[in-house]
Amino acid sequence: MSPVILFRADAGASIGAGHVMRCLAVAEAVQDMGFAAGFVSAALPPALEDRLQAAGMDVHRIDAEPGSEDDLAATLIVIRDCEAAAIVVDGYRFGPDWRAGLAGAGLPVLAFDDAGTGEPLHAALIVNAAPDAARLPYGSGNPDATLLLGPAYAPLRREVRRAAAAVKAPLPERRAMLVTFGGSDPLGLTAPVLVRLAAALPPDVRIDVAVGGAAPNADAVVQAAAPLGDRVSVHRDTPRMGQLMAGAGLAVSAAGTTTAELAAIGTPAVLVTIADNQLEAARQSEALGWCRLVNGRIPDAPERIAETAAALWADPSLRVAMAARLSGIVDGQGAVRIAEALARRVTAR
């Protein structure tokens, strides 16, 4: 029986699907190395659960408030029952007591972290793929942790890694724009942005709209797309995200986990911040020159997003220059590196 690595992550309309999706990238990589992968979740939309199970991963649902004592107790029971060899934790609601209690189980813990405050994370390995993560004070509170920091550790799902490695059409020849606001689109931006983009772009530009499995407004997106005919394709919880990115001459995307995927594939983007925890990493990405940043929470956000995207589309040479700045930033092997580091901890026990 293969050793089991568990992943503790949640998804939903308010928190999106980013935590689960980057865990999925590492889970696929550990599967490729011969481990079994399972998820422990207190909140998980059915579409995402189906996706994990289709990938051969067990899903253990727990009935507890995320980050609570009951959550910790339930997670520890799953660890015991699965005889887990390690656990990966990804989420903002797991406080210091919860993390310390998990570490007390005695198995290696890998923590995804986006804050970098230096506070103890009670983890053997810490991952932060932001461009300047190496400058953050992780060592002060985690002196013994293995630090996996920077874009080399950006976790990409298997199908995105394949798309990044494949030969792609030159950027000016791609006549599609990709629009995606993450797994749940919590601000409901997809439909209004789609309508404005359709009016602002040349009529020969196709618009691919990717709607995540946790999005409660998917039907509204389909309704907004209907009058636009064959020019717009709506992809619901698609397993072809890498292909859509590779076929786009520009992407409009929430500034979450999709950021690293676009960077690896080489597609310039309009990144839209929809939560405070996205701001710093998104600013770092913009400073590298391959994307433009728009605040998704301002009142006229749909107009600003569409105007920015239309202006970039009208300047192919600028988009080519933006894409050129992506060379070498994300090589697509982050999930593999994380899985290898985790496997070393497991085998060293």
Image (spheres, rainbow, N blue to C red):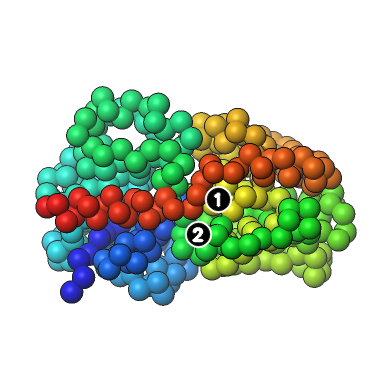
Q: Nearer the viewer, residue 344 or 40?
A: 344
To which residue does mark 2 refer? 161
- Quadrant for residue 319, please give it: top right
Judge by depth and name the residue closer to the eye, 242 or 57: 242
Residue 229: give its label.
none
* Residue 239, image x, y percentages: 54, 68
Q: Inspect this view and state whether residue 12 appears.
A: no
x then y, percent, for residue 90: 35, 48
Question: Is 296 displayed left or right of 5 in the figure?
Answer: right
Quarter of the figure that contains the N terminus: bottom left
Q: Looking at the image, tell me whether mark 2 or mark 1 is earlier in sequence order.
A: 2
Q: Please state the horizontal and vertical placement of residue 315, each as a whole percent of the image.
A: 82, 42
**Disc 2 crowd, CA 10 A, few/some/many (<14, 14-19, 20+):** many
Q: Amino acid at mark 2?
A: Arg
Can the viewer see residue 132?
A: yes
Measuring from the top left, give residue 101's x and y in whole percent: 16, 44
Helix, strand or loop status at disc 2? helix
Q: Which residue is mark 1?
A: 264
Identity of the amino acid at label 1? Ala
CA–CA distance in space, label 2 to label 1 = 8 Å
In the foreground, 127 or 232: 127
Q: Could you tell me which residue is drawn at 59 percent across and 63 percent down?
A: 166
- Residue found 54% across the figure and 43% down from its top: 328
Q: Residues within 10 Å of mark 1 (few under 14, many from 20)?
A: many
Residue sitting at x 34%, y 41%: 148
Asked if residue 308 is positioned above or below residue 331 in the image, the reply reads: above
Direction from residue 248 to residue 137 in the image, left or right = left
Q: Is residue 27 above or below residue 255?
A: below
| Residue at 38 percent of width and 38 percent of height | 149
Marks 2,1: beta carbons within 8 A: yes
Image position of 31 with respect to 190: above or below = below
